[in-house]
C-alpha cells in the first residue's frame, strides 16, 4: 500500500535559517505529491504540489521537487520567518480513478525571532 | 460560504453516547472526504463520497462509525457508543472532480471530539 514517511519534529530554527523537512514515500505507479500546512488553530491548507517526476512545486518561498529515483519530496525554504511556525504534512495521492490522500505524521516547525 | 465548514467546532461527550459531526463542502464540489487526526497517529482516511454514494469506506475503524451524504452536499459522520479512543480531530475535505484525478482537496477547520 501507499505510505509517507516524514522526519520527526519538532524542528526548531532561528529566523532567516534554511529549512529542510524530509519526506519519502512508497507507492505503486506515479503518485501526485503534496505538502499541506496547518497553522496553529487553523485547518489544513495546501502549500504546494507536484504531479509528475522532476516537477517542482513552489509557494510562499517554499519549494519541493518530485524525485522519482529517490522517492522523495523534501520541503525547503531559504529563509524562514516566525510566521512559518506550523505543522507541515507531506501527502501522496495515487493516480487513476479516484484516490484518497495518504499523509505523513506531520512535522512541527518552530521558528524563533 | 467560500470554504468547507464543519460543525460543531468542539464536542465533548461521555463515553457511550452517540455523536453527529457535520460537514458542508464547497458549493459544486462533488467529492467529499472524512479524515481523522489523532495525536501520534497523523491523519487517517475514513470515508470518501462521490455525490451521495460512498465507493470507499475502507478507513472506517469499526461498525460504530457511519456516514451519509444527502443532496450531493452536506455530509454527517455519526459515531455510536463513543469510546475514549475516538477522541480526535475529525477533518472534512471536498474537491471538484477533474479529468485525470488532478483535483485538489480543500479542508475544513475540523471538529475536535473529546470523549470523557
Image (cartoon, coloured by chain):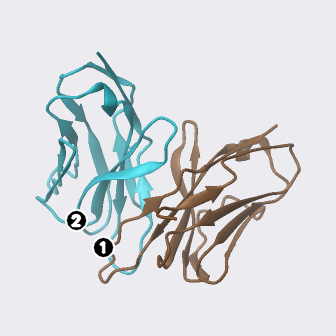
Chain colours: A cyan, B brown
Q: Answer above or below: position of A73 versus A101.
A: above
Q: Residues within 10 Å of mark 2 (few under 14, many from 20)?
A: some
Image coordinates of residue B6 in percent, x first then y, are 61, 57
Give the left or right position of residue A61, taking residue B30 as reference: left
Q: Residue at x 18, y 22 (%)?
A: A17
The quarter of the picture where the C terminus of chain B appears is: top right
Residue identified by numbered label 1: B102
Label 2 residue SS = loop
The reply to whether callout 2 and callout 1 are in contact (CB within 8 Å) is yes
Q: Answer above or below: position of A97 versus A53.
A: below
Give the left or right position of residue B57, taking residue B78 as reference: left
Image coordinates of residue A53 in percent, x first then y, are 15, 62
The image quarter containing residue B73 is: bottom right
Which labelled disc corresponds to residue B6?
none
Q: Nearer the viewer, residue A55 or A68?
A: A55
Residue identified by numbered label 2: A51
Give the left or right position of residue B65, taking residue B50 as reference: right
Q: Which chain does the numbered disc 2 sit on?
A: A
Amino acid at each position: 500500500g501507499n505510505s509517507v514517511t516524514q522526519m520527526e519534529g519538532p524542528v526548531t530554527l532561528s529566523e532567516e535559517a534554511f529549512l529542510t523537512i524530509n519526506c519519502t514515500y512508497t507507492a505503486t505507479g506515479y503518485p501526485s505529491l503534496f505538502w499541506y500546512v496547518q497553522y496553529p488553530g487553523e485547518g489544513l491548507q495546501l502549500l504546494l504540489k507536484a504531479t509528475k517526476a522532476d516537477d517542482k512545486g513552489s509557494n510562499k518561498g517554499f519549494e519541493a521537487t518530485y524525485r522519482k529515483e529517490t522517492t522523495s519530496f523534501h520541503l525547503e525554504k531559504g529563509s524562514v520567518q516566525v510566521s512559518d511556525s506550523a505543522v507541515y504534512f507531506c501527502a501522496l495521492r495515487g493516480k487513476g480513478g479516484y484516490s484518497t490522500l495518504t499523509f505523513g505524521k506531520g512535522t512541527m516547525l518552530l521558528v524563533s525571532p | 460560504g467560500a470554504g468547507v465548514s464543519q460543525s460543531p467546532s468542539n464536542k465533548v461527550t461521555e463515553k457511550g453516547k452517540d455523536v453527529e459531526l457535520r460537514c458542508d463542502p464547497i458549493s459544486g464540489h462533488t467529492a467529499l472526504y472524512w479524515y481523522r487526526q489523532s495525536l501520534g497517529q497523523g491523519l487517517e482516511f475514513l470515508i470518501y463520497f462521490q455525490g451521495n454514494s460512498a465507493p470507499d469506506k475502507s478507513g472506517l475503524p469499526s461498525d460504530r462509525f457511519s456516514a451519509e451524504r444527502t443532496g450531493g452536499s452536506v455530509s454527517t459522520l455519526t459515531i455510536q457508543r463513543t469510546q475514549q479512543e475516538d477522541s480526535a480531530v475529525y477533518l472534512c475535505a471536498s474537491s471538484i472532480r477533474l479529468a485525470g484525478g488532478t483535483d485538489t482537496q480543500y479542508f475544513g477547520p475540523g471538529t475536535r471530539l473529546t470523549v470523557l
